[in-house]
Image (tube, rainbow, N blue to C red):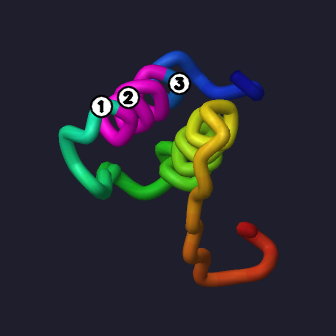
């Protein structure tokens, strides 16, 4: 992926995989502050877009988006 740390990449792929397999309609990533949830979300969206599907990302600020 794009400069994700290994644990972030694993999380993004696991979330995207669960969404792809229809196991769940949504996926929540929660951890301590500063571990890269925004980066994981970008990784999940990238995987979803690779499959030709649409993604909606609601972001609290334009700087993060």
Q: Extreme right residue here?
A: 63
For the residues labelled 3 and 1, say whether their Cβ atoms are less than 8 Å apart.
Answer: no
Which residue is found at the position 57% from the left and 41% from the top?
Answer: 48
Which residue is found at the position 43% from the left and 35% from the top?
Answer: 16
Q: Which secondary structure lies at badge 2? A: helix
Name the quadrant containing residue 47. top right
- Callout 2: few (<14), some (14-19), or many (20+) C-alpha neighbours within 10 Å? some
Q: Which secondary structure lies at badge 3? A: helix
Magenta residue check for 58: no
For the residues labelled 1 and 2, say whether their Cβ atoms are less than 8 Å apart.
Answer: yes
- Callout 1: few (<14), some (14-19), or many (20+) C-alpha neighbours within 10 Å? few
With respect to residue 20, does 32 lie above or below? below
Q: Extreme top residue here?
A: 6
The mark nearer the N terminus, 3 or 1, is 3
Magenta span? 10-20
Res 17 label: 2
Query: Viewer-nearest of labels 3 and 1?
Result: 1
With respect to residue 36, does 38 lie above or below? below
The mark nearer the N terminus, 3 or 2, is 3
Q: Nearer the viewer, residue 26 or 37?
A: 26
| Distance CA(mark 3)–CA(mark 1) | 18 Å
User: In what quadrant of the picture does the C terminus appear?
Assistant: bottom right
The residue indicated by pointer 3 is 9
| Distance CA(mark 3)–CA(mark 2) | 12 Å
The residue indicated by pointer 1 is 21
| Distance CA(mark 1)–CA(mark 2) | 6 Å
Magenta residue check for 12: yes
Q: Extreme left residue here?
A: 23
User: In what quadrant of the picture does the N terminus appear?
Assistant: top right
For the residues labelled 3 and 2, say whether their Cβ atoms are less than 8 Å apart.
Answer: no
């Amino acid at each position: 992926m794009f400069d994700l740390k290994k644990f972030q990449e694993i999380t993004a792929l696991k979330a995207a995989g669960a969404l792809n397999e229809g196991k769940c309609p949504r996926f929540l990533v929660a951890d301590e502050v500063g571990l890269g949830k925004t980066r994981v979300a970008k990784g999940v969206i990238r995987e979803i877009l690779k499959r030709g599907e649409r993604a909606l990302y609601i972001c609290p600020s334009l700087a993060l988006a």
